[in-house]
Amino acid sequence: MLTPEFELSQDNQFITITIKVRHAKISEIELYIDGPDFRFYMKPYYLRLCLPGDLVEDGRETASYDIDRATLVVRAPKANEGQWFDGLDMLTTLMAPRRRRQHDARPAIEEIQERSEQTEDDTEQVDDGSDADDDFFIEQEIRRELSPLTGVKYGFANRLSGFFTHCEDYTEIVDVPDPDHMPAAERRSLRLADEKKKFNPEHYLYDLFENEDIERLLAYQPPYRQLLTQHEFQVCQEVSGDAAVSVTESRIHPSVTFSDEEKDALRRLPNRKYLLDKREERTAYLCLVDLIFCYAYNHRITEGDNSVESPWTVGKLSPTLCWLDSFSSVSDVLTACCRRSLIYPLYCHFDLTQSVLTDLHTIFRLGCCQLVKCVLELRHMIARDETRRMLNDLYVTDVCVWAQAASRRKIKKIADRIHQFRLQRDDVDLDLEELETTVRQALAEGGSNDDSTEDNDNTEDTDSDDSSSDDETDDSDEEDPDRTTDDKSECDHNR
């Protein structure tokens, strides 16, 4: 069976499903509507969608075939008129099988902990959409244990092991020595030591004081900045009164749309289903923060035009992709990404890193559609790189699929955390404050010495001129010894 190209739109009463099928025979088309399930069949095409809301067959449903465009347009009425279906752009998620109830979505095998060692976060497994898990991104220390049954874990949500067993060239992909046998805590320790060793003060100072490209990169305005501005203006126009913001803004969506190429890429993604426990889910969200930071950095320094160096930049900048690291809080992952942005890439500038943080916040504010667009671009970029395409299998493809069904509430919460994050030079542990202060003092002292030298040169020139004048006067007096006093006074006056 072939999955046809399709897209969805909606109004208050209907969901419109546009399906591209060639040489359709109306008599062979079969449609099925039952609550959230929609099915279409016409040999050799088959499409099954699980929608975020219920549809109903009440006689108002219609189907028409446009011969010129070779498309079948199905209009199905909503069971609850006025209900807004979120996520109709997330084509991969719509094609996935219907989920089980959330409280049943647990791994078949779970690690049993002693009751005295359990935390409140570990015992809470159900996400019912309430605020019970508001501590999702609070700083916390997670034990990193190596299970003798599962071995070293890495990859999306730390669910893979043994991936590099038969990979001989993994040193060109990741910086971790022996990744299948190195525990997470040791990976973190080695990463920090390697970053300290690779930091180049001369590179940093050159970009800080002499690199003319930095000002241009700081002035660049990514297109998603304009999208957010338009969205905020629309919200201001639609919402009257602060009390209505939370209700009305949820119905006003930023104008983020997928291109035809992106829609095709979404349809081709695997229909995977992720049953993540709370710890794995946290890891997945923070991995998304890591990837989007790297995307934002690369987008800014290339000014939206990816280069052949972009896969290297992203792969090297990301502590997740380069060191298979995972994190426990938003500030933890942001500090790690910012630190690496001041060590490895072409441009290492503190203000540039601050601008990337602003871009990151903008992307998360725009929501899931913009996030998926960015990860899709990362995936396409990495797939074209012979060396690093394996990173898609490790992380990026799974993030593309999983992010389409990510919680809007948690995405907004992450955006708020990014906005609250304040990076200080001391946070990256590279002695930047001391380094910059020393150089600025040296430059200031050098400027003072130059001014002093110039003043001395001017003084010497003045003295020299005065001496010359005296000599000339003396010579003049010697040449005419018979001149009267009045003649001398007149000459002095004229001079």
Image (cartoon, helix red, strand yellow):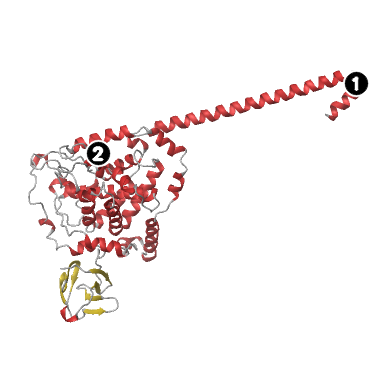
Rendered-image quadrant of the N terminus: bottom left
Lateral position of residue 316 relative to residue 471, left or right:
left
Question: Secondary structure beneath disc 2?
Answer: loop
What residue is shown with label 1? 485
Question: Secondary structure beneath disc 1?
Answer: helix
What residue is shown with label 2? 175
Rendered-image quadrant of the C terminus: top right
| x and y, in percent, of residue 379 in the image | 27, 53
Lateral position of residue 434 relative to residue 467, left or right:
left
Q: Which amino acid type corresponds to the residue marked 1 in the rendered image?
A: Thr
Does the image show residue 250? no
- Which of the 4 image quadrants contains residue 222? bottom left
- Which of the 4 image quadrants contains residue 31? bottom left
**Lower position in the chain sequence, tag 1 or tag 2:** 2
- The residue closer to the viewer here, 41 or 320, is 41
| x and y, in percent, of residue 105 in the image | 12, 55
| x and y, in percent, of residue 144 in the image | 16, 39
Does the image show residue 163? yes
404 is higher (above) or lower (below) than 424? below
Residues at marks 1 and 2, CA–CA distance in whole angstroms: 94 Å
Please tell me which residue is depicted at 15% across the width and 57% down the height of the picture: 273
Q: Which amino acid type corresponds to the residue marked 2 in the rendered image?
A: Asp
- The residue closer to the viewer here, 184 or 308, is 308
